[in-house]
Image: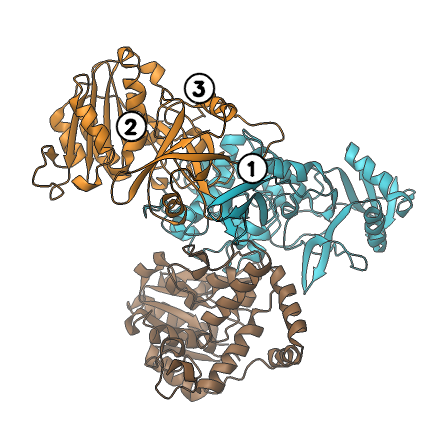
Amino acid sequence: MSPDPDQAQAVQQPGGNLYAPITMTIAESRDETYDVRTLRLQFPGETERAAFFEKYRVGMFGLYGVPGAGESAFCIASPPTQDQYIECTFRKAGRVTTALCDREVGQAITFRGPYGNFFPIEQWKGKNIVFIAGGIALPPIRAVIWNVLDRRDEFGRLTIVYGARTVADLVYKHELQQWQKRKDVKLILTVDPGGETDDWKGEIGFVPMVLEKAAPSAENAVAVVCGPLIMIKFTLLPLKQLNFPDAHAYTTLENRMKCGVGKCGRCNVGSLYVCKDGPVFTIEQLKNLPQGDL
Amino acid sequence: MKLIDANKLTALAAALARAGYRVVAPVEDSGVVRLKEWAEGAAIRTGAVPVNSAKDFLFPPSEIIGRWDLDGDDFMPRDVQPDAPKTVLLAVRPCDAAALALLDTVFNWDYKDDFYNARRQAVTVVPMVCTAADEQCFCTSVGGAPDATAGADAMLRPADGGTRFILEPLTDKGNALLDAAGLALAEGEAAADPPVEIARRFDVEAVTEWLSRNFESDLWPALSLACLGCGACAYACPTCHCFDIQDEATRRESVRLKNWDSCGFGLFTLHAGGHNPRPDQTARWRNRVMHKFSYIPERFALVGCTGCGRCARVCGAGMSMSEVCRLIADETKKAPTHES
Amino acid sequence: MDVDRLRQDAAAVLADGRARMVIGFRDRAGDRVPAFITDAEQAGELLYDEACRQNLAAYLKKAELKRFRPVAIVARPAVMRSLVLLAAEAQVADEDVLVLGVSDDQEYHGILDLAATAALLNEKYAEMPHDPDLVKRIEEISAMTPEERSGFWTEQFARCTRCYACRAACPMCYCTQCIVEKNVPQWISTAAAGHGNYAWNIIRAFHLAGRCTECGACEAACPQGIPLMLLNVVLARDVEEEFGVKVGYDAEAEPVIGSWREDDNEDFIR
């Protein structure tokens, strides 16, 4: 498999320090769950903002950091159509994400990016899109959803199947309510059995089964699946039964990364660098990767 | 031709140091021959392959790539420049120089790493033709040779039965170095000694071909049994280039470091969520072999190994890349392909 | 040494199922490298001589080898002590391991279980003197001023690349997450330089105080030739003098580092 020629070209100032981040200011901070937070980040100036949005396509990722703690890679959770800021959503899991959580509105963090490839949404114009997400994997899909919603006329029917372990684990609850109210989006929420609350009105069951039941049509449609690897694997069967071709189903991989630019050598799956050849892959590509490296 | 007596290499080093070069050469240090900055009085030891490779001076074990002043919750970035003094890598090995093609490619194939590039531009590479080899040497199996000039700016050729060296310039950098050496070199004639003969141990193309269809093979557990998962092989390797990025802070300052890392370590690929794509040493060793002999050939049309044999020399557990490659090559002879 | 008896015993324990794997040594072009024998017919590959210095007990920590237990391990006295100590630290059970015992002067001791191994150690190897060359160097270093001594070690540790070959080679370094990898908080600087190298090597030595059986595998595995045994022997000697314990002789003994006594001679710990 060769690298995607559509992939964003390297963007680097000649003679510049490849690893030097810019300093972003936290404009807003929201707790999504007990351990998941969203930060809205403001660029230091118009030059940096313009340079970022010239490159940024939905699906790309960045490295967010706090000097003294380090950097961590995760997706850019806001779409290029909202071009005055970026957002990121992350779970407090280690040293860097704890330091990021400790930063308050008005304080700074470091940022490098955008890096990696992107969802080819320009090829999806006029198509129906089925979004399937589990748990903390909604952020990359959320960026696509808003990108599409901000250009609503260009796309067909939108179906979102989103599930989490428990109601408390659902992220972007405020936006889920907005999407629920919209007539031009079909949102199906689910929680794992036992994860429901007394007033839960959504589905109860695992994402692949809820998808099977919802049975969105594969005709003129693409699917976008993000979640833990195990969820992706179990979603492949209903997608196949619904006749989604592997080449029209997309996912993102979130391997451990350090450099983000194809040097440090740890994110590879087989001969592909997730940071350069991904993080977006079709299911067709995913199936051709050495499965034991995923 | 330019000549220097074999016992006068230190005079050459001294002349180059006077001319402003940082001289890196094989010297003995606590019983181990290593490449390090030469200092007046140190003997240059050409008889053994140094324990470290020349990559240490292009991609050091630990390098500062970011720096911030800290003031409570505030931080202010400070400019960081690569530390790239004009350097000669003197009497390194052809297998060191051969590794530069891969390092140049990895650090420049898309984004450009200016820390590497600044050091690379400042370096003049002067390998010595090998007239002796040990059991671990296998450059000829991976496209190299004991007298290969790839990556070299000038060559030191042992001559007249090892009593002198011919110093032969190959590039502008090499010519500049000869000029700088001045009177340390004599003009004269000498007969170059033949390079050592190193038998080919395996067919590298057969290895690459086998790897391309054997990610899942029963052979991997057996090939990796002895590996105990340290980084000795990767750190001694002239082509291994994996690194970690870590911050180190005091109350007033934080630095961001690019530290060597190895795919042999268990934490290398561990996700924050707990999943590890390579959960055991079998998977990690497979990645090491695959990277060198399948992924790099596929991606960059190079072989990720120069046959220096350092990995086997330093391994405390008796692992050997050439033995593994030979076993894989044997496998291809045993089992003609059923596919296609 | 009677290598034939070693080979016969290896074949026998594999054939009758007492062991599913024998870990010993083989020759590879003059090098002594580990051999992993699962088939009695391959036991002829085994050999043993004074060049076999790796501590094969380190393979007990390797996850992929757990399915081959019980394993029979070719062990010299220092390695036997590692195995007894691993049992004392509850890392192996009696039924996990057999020993094919060899002495440092090439005598073959036959097939031993851990109890018989401990008995042999107490009977024949109760007095294992510290390496006299090491003791001499330790005395030289002890005679230095603190500044000189600090300078000596700074120079030694400067060469450390943090490859952790010492940790990998040591059977007692079995932590699933080593302190050097803990980063909340970051105890030890990750840079392969200066105080981080110093801290790493000293902390590892301290974690082996009262646990090192002086097999020498860490020092032998160090590509940079750092004299790690100078540290280990000093600490082993201190533990002997302060606690009256020589480790690796009693699988029931409480580890020095993991136990305390009411009559401890340090006031602060009571």
Give the chain ID for the orange colour: A
Is residue B338 positioned above or below B45 on the image? above
Is residue B4 positioned above or below A229 on the image? below
- Which residue in the protein does label 1 denote? B303
Residue at 47% in and 20% down: A54
Q: Determine whether the residue tagged by mark 2 lies in a helix, strand or loop.
A: helix
- Which residue in the protein does label 3 denote? A6
Sequence-wise first label, 2 or 3: 3
Q: Is label 2 on the same chain as label 3?
A: yes
Work out how far the residue at label 2 is from the one at label 3, CA to CA, in angstroms. Answer: 22 Å
Q: Characterize the local packing of mark 2: few (<14), some (14-19) or many (20 or more) Cα atoms within 10 angstroms.
A: many
Give the chain ID for the cyan colour: B
**Does the image show residue A254?**
yes
User: In which image quadrant can residue A237 be found?
Assistant: top left
Looking at the image, which is closer to me, A95 or B264?
A: A95
Compared across the picture, whether B160 is left or right of C246 comes to right
Q: Determine whether the residue tagged by mark 1 lies in a helix, strand or loop.
A: loop
Identified by mark 1, the residue type is Val
Identified by mark 2, the residue type is Arg
- x, y percent for residue B153: 75, 37
Residue at 26% in and 38% down: A32
Is residue B40 positioned above or below A100 on the image? below
- Is the residue under label 2 in contact with that under label 1 (CB below 8 Å)? no
Instruction: Chain C: give its colour.
Output: brown
- Which residue in the protein does label 2 denote? A142
Front disc: 1 or 3: 3
